[in-house]
């Protein structure tokens, strides 16, 4: 009985999976009418930050390190009541582009690796400070906005893998498991494999 024939396929092989934190932060001039507690920085006026879309990340991979810039579109909504009628609320809106930055040490990753990231918001914090450039008679205030994200990071590398056309045993004896794989990156129309040669490996969704 002849030896099983082998063939080569290109696949993205997962090199690292991490859960990291990234922070988006911006300082803006407080809209007129926003009051703050000068001792704690807490806002005394109802303010809401509405996120308009998913954050957009632009990852850069250097040896053993992931550097990440990003941008979050948002809208700052301020609500205040008119003195003559407490039931009448005037809303002002300010569109914001909030920059995001993160840098993480991840062993074994290299330039050219593919990065997939899935983010969810952990917290949003808005605090105020007095504008140091405002004159003593002015009422200038600055709002400091911070968004903390929990980000699932998956880093994969394109590799050539040899497999047999015939595999008499079960999945654990085969180089690649059968079906059910989730694409990580598929721009080059290549097969996607998560952790080949490691039976029962966790698939990244």
Image: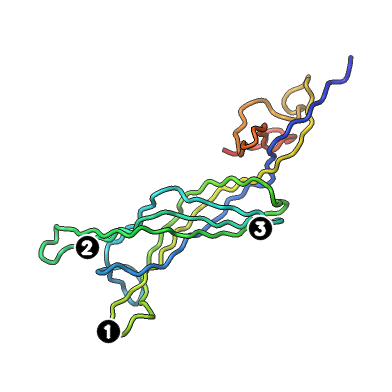
Residue 137 tag number: 1
Q: Distance between the residues labelled 2 and 3?
A: 45 Å
Residue at image coords 71%, 33%: 199
Q: Distance between the residues labelled 1 and 3?
A: 48 Å
Nearest the viewer among 156 and 69 is 69
The local crowd at label 1, few if under 14, some if 14 to 19, many if 20 or more residues have their Cα within 10 Å, is few
Indicate left or right for 134 with 106 as reference: left
Q: Find residue 188 and report its image quarter.
A: top right
Q: Name the residue under label 3.
A: 105
**Which element is circle 1 on?**
loop
Task: Return the disc, 2 or 3, that comes first in the chain's sequence.
Answer: 2
Q: Mark 2 points at which residue?
A: 80
Residue 42: x and y, percent? 34, 69
Name of the residue lying farthest toward the top: 1
Residue at image coords 38%, 80%: 133
Q: Distance between the residues labelled 1 and 2?
A: 23 Å
Q: Nearer the viewer, mark 1 or mark 3?
A: 1
Residue 10 tag number: none
Residue at image coords 37%, 74%: 129
Task: Return the disc, 1 or 2, that comes first in the chain's sequence.
Answer: 2
Indicate left or right for 168 with 90 as reference: right
Nearest the viewer among 33 and 187 is 187
């Amino acid at each position: 009985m002849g030896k099983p024939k082998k063939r080569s396929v290109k696949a993205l092989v997962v090199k690292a999976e991490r859960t990291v934190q990234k922070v988006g932060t911006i300082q803006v001039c407080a809209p007129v009418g926003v009051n703050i507690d000068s001792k704690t920085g807490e806002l005394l006026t109802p303010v809401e930050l509405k996120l308009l879309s998913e954050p957009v990340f632009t990852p850069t991979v250097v040896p053993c390190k992931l550097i990440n810039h990003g941008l979050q579109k948002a809208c700052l909504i301020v609500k205040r009541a008119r003195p003559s009628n407490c039931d009448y609320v005037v809303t002002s809106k300010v569109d914001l582009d909030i920059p995001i930055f993160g840098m993480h040490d991840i062993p074994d990753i290299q330039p050219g690796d593919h990065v997939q990231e899935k983010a969810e918001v952990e917290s949003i914090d808005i605090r105020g400070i007095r504008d140091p450039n405002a004159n003593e008679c002015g009422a200038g205030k600055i709002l400091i906005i911070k968004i903390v994200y929990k980000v699932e990071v998956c880093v994969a590398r394109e590799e050539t893998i040899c497999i047999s056309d015939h595999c008499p045993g079960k999945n654990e004896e085969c180089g690649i498991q059968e079906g059910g794989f989730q694409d990580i990156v598929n721009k080059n129309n290549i097969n996607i494999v998560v952790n080949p040669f490691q039976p029962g490996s966790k698939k990244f969704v």
